[in-house]
Amino acid sequence: MKTLLSAPVASALFGGLLLSLFSFSIVSENGKAGYTNSPNEGNCTSCHSGTAVNAGGGSIAITISGLDVGNQYIAGQSYTVNVVVAQTGNPLFGFGCEALDSTGKSIGTLVVTNSAQTQLRNATVAANVRSNIVHKLNGGLSSNTHTFSFTWKAPATAVGTGKVTFHAAGVAANNNGSDSGDKVYTTSLALTALTVTNAVSPILSGAIALRAYPNPATDRINISYSLRQMATTTLRLVDAQGREVFARPAQQATGSQQESIDIARLAAGIYRVDVEIEGVHHYLPVQVL
């Protein structure tokens, strides 16, 4: 014998089932790739509605630790990237971020450092497979603001012009079980490659190019180079934040030059040797252990 349900009861049960499925699909959502507001991409308003982009009173910002002055990166080095999404009163945040070269291709390597909050996903945009780092389910669960952190390893060489642009979009969600009433923010940050070279200048002797040793070092770093003629020089050591931690100006004669820098007091990390010769700069990265 079949059991029949009255129309009101069936309607209520069916509606409840739909509501349960709908709510589950919303709260189980992970971040999606390809919505960072970069060229040929949309942003989070493709799903989330509330206000116009960047008009909700909150913010998003990208900060990268260890860059040189003028947002310059050193090829092959790794950097900590923080994407901060903020909205007073909101309890849940999401984001997507990618690093692109001047042609729209992913550049460098994104590395997950907090697997509970972030993950890697790909999107094909204008025939380019772009690598994105995005939030996980409830990875941005916090009040008023959330910082998503990860690592970006710069390419081994400066590709093309060496320009890299980070694009990020963030969602400040009200966590009401739907995609309505959320706020969306976008931003970008452009980097250029720091020229690190052993190439000789007209004054540097081609026989002995700029050299730093030992590298890595713990107590002292020795610098050697040779001049074709007498020159005004300045030897500098600059930290990852672009701060000058050592400087020695000199008037030097033709021939081989040997300099030594005491680094015993310095914090471990990547530094830059800068030998300025008659206004021409020559750079080398060094590591202090």
Image (tube, grey):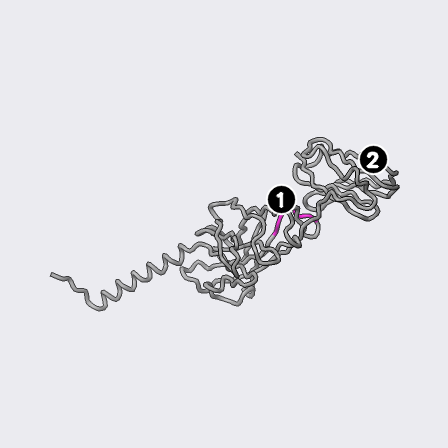
Q: Which residue is painted at 47% across and 50% down in the image?
A: 139
Task: Give the side of residue 283 with respect to residue 177, left or right.
Answer: right
Q: How packed is label 2: few (under 14 Cα within 10 Å), some, or many (20 or more)?
A: some
Q: Secondary structure at mark 1?
A: loop
Q: Amino acid at mark 2?
A: Ser
Label 2 belongs to which residue? 256
Residue span colored magenta: 63-68
Q: Amino acid at mark 1?
A: Gly
Q: Position of residue 73 (x, y in %)?
A: 66, 48
Task: Give the side of residue 98 with respect to residue 250, left or right.
Answer: left
Note whether 193 is above or below 207 in the view shown. below
Q: Which residue is painted at 55% across and 54% down in the image?
A: 98
Which of the 4 image quadrants contains residue 163?
bottom right
Label 1 belongs to which residue? 76
In the picture, which quadrant includes the C terminus?
top right
Q: Position of residue 259 (x, y in %)?
A: 79, 35
Q: Secondary structure at mark 2?
A: strand
Q: Residue 67 bears which disc, if any?
A: none
As for residue 65 lying within the magenta part, the answer is: yes
Q: Earlier in the sequence, mark 2 or mark 1?
A: 1
Judge by depth and name the residue closer to the eye, 193 or 270: 193
